[in-house]
Image: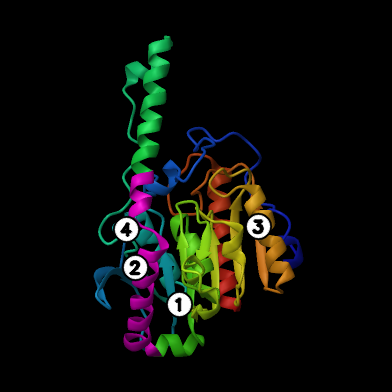
């Protein structure tokens, strides 16, 4: 497929449009779906190869090519979903990029407090019940899950996460100066929660106050002094993000580096209207970008994890190739 087609069409190997059993239902308000807060089963025969350690005072998962530092590498930040750096699947995802020649640093964005598992099993008796009381119980369980996630999100805002990333980036420029220099800067990929932060690292912007839903307002504007906003960024050379969450159209403003987006069709966590608004902003601001929309796959599909559906497995491969190609070409 021609590269121009990729920006407007889903790859031909994407899954067909189907309802995905167990997929996150449409939700309202500031929250994340179950695919952001719990892992799929790990594919058989795969295990992490990197290490957990400190970098710049921050816990990270580090994965390096076997040939590093003998052979030149590039530095890649991997920003995870809410499952965090101790997730086996996230670690294996980092290893896949390391196998392609990147020194991969996956920072703990949550300071040891990954998202609570919103996919807790509901008692079998309640699942099978058909009475009005049973339905009330199920609805109450769903509301409780959403409330717990919203509380967690309130503790992990941009004001908390960006300073963590700044510490890690500075430490990378020191310890892995060779990889940063070889790549002409730092690259970043992000999934779910981490996807939004690829956009933030790719932009030049002032300090902002954000709500759970990603709505932004310059901090100095809050204080009535918007003229003195100090801008930062961009921090990266190029970025790739998959099924991002908590993104608002304003997150696409001020982008200064090329970005590629892996999106899920009719994704309640990244609504079509947000994606379409983002595409218009990037085009208006002459940002090099690529957007691929994958039908018939669940939110979170691009992260390592086992699925029975062969079409979803094929889409996983295609999404990884899309992200890898972008950061290699830029």
In the rendered image, which residue does mark 2 sit on?
A: 107
Q: Is residue 45 visible?
A: no
Q: Is residue 133 above or below residue 216?
A: above
Question: Distance of mark 1 from mark 2, alpha carbons?
Answer: 19 Å
In the rendered image, which residue does mark 3 sit on?
A: 292
Badge 1: how crowded within 10 Å, few (<14), some, or many (20+)?
Answer: many
Q: Residue at x 60, y 53 (%)?
A: 263
Q: Residue at x 38, y 51 (%)?
A: 153
Q: Which residues are magenta?
A: 150-177
Question: Foreground residue, 20 or 31?
Answer: 31
Which residue occupies the extreme top position in the image? 131
Contact, mark 4 vs mark 3 (Cβ under 8 Å): no
Badge 4: how crowded within 10 Å, few (<14), some, or many (20+)?
Answer: few
Question: Foreground residue, 299 or 287?
Answer: 287
Comes first in the chain, label 3 or label 1: 1
Question: Distance of mark 2 from mark 3, alpha carbons?
Answer: 26 Å
Of marks 2 and 4, the one in the foreground: 2
Which residue occupies the extreme front position in the image? 224
Question: Distance of mark 4 from mark 1, alpha carbons?
Answer: 18 Å
Question: Foreground residue, 131 or 88?
Answer: 131
Q: Quadrant of the N terminus?
A: bottom right
């Amino acid at each position: 497929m021609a590269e121009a087609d990729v920006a407007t069409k889903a790859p031909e190997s994407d899954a067909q449009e189907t309802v995905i059993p167990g997929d996150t239902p449409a939700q309202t308000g500031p929250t994340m779906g179950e695919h952001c807060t719990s892992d799929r089963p790990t594919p058989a025969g795969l295990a992490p190869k990197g290490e957990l350690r400190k970098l710049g005072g921050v816990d990270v998962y580090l994965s390096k090519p076997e040939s590093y530092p003998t052979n030149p590498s590039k530095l890649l930040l991997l920003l995870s979903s809410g499952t965090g750096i101790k997730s086996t699947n996230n670690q294996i995802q980092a290893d896949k990029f390391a196998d392609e020649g990147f020194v991969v640093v996956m920072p703990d964005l949550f300071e040891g407090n990954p998202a609570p598992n919103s996919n807790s099993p509901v008692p079998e008796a309640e699942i099978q019940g058909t009475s009005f009381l049973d339905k009330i119980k199920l609805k109450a369980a769903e509301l409780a899950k959403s409330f717990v996630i919203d509380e967690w999100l309130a503790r992990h805002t941009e004001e908390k996460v960006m300073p963590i990333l700044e510490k890690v980036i500075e430490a990378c420029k020191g310890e892995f100066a060779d990889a940063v220099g070889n790549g002409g800067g730092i690259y970043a990929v992000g999934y779910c929660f981490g996807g939004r932060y690829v956009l933030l690292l790719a932009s030049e912007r002032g300090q902002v106050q954000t709500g759970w839903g990603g709505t932004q307002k310059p901090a100095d504007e809050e204080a009535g002094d918007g003229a003195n906003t100090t801008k930062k960024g961009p921090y990266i050379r190029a970025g790739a993000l998959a099924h991002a969450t908590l993104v608002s159209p304003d997150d696409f403003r001020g982008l200064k580096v090329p970005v590629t987006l892996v999106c899920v069709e009719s994704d309640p966590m990244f609504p079509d209207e947000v994606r379409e608004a983002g595409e218009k902003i990037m085009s208006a601001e002459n940002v090099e970008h690529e957007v691929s929309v994958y039908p018939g796959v669940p939110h979170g599909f691009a992260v390592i994890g086992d699925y029975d559906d062969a079409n979803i497995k094929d889409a996983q491969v295609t999404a990884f190739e899309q992200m890898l190609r972008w950061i290699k070409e830029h």
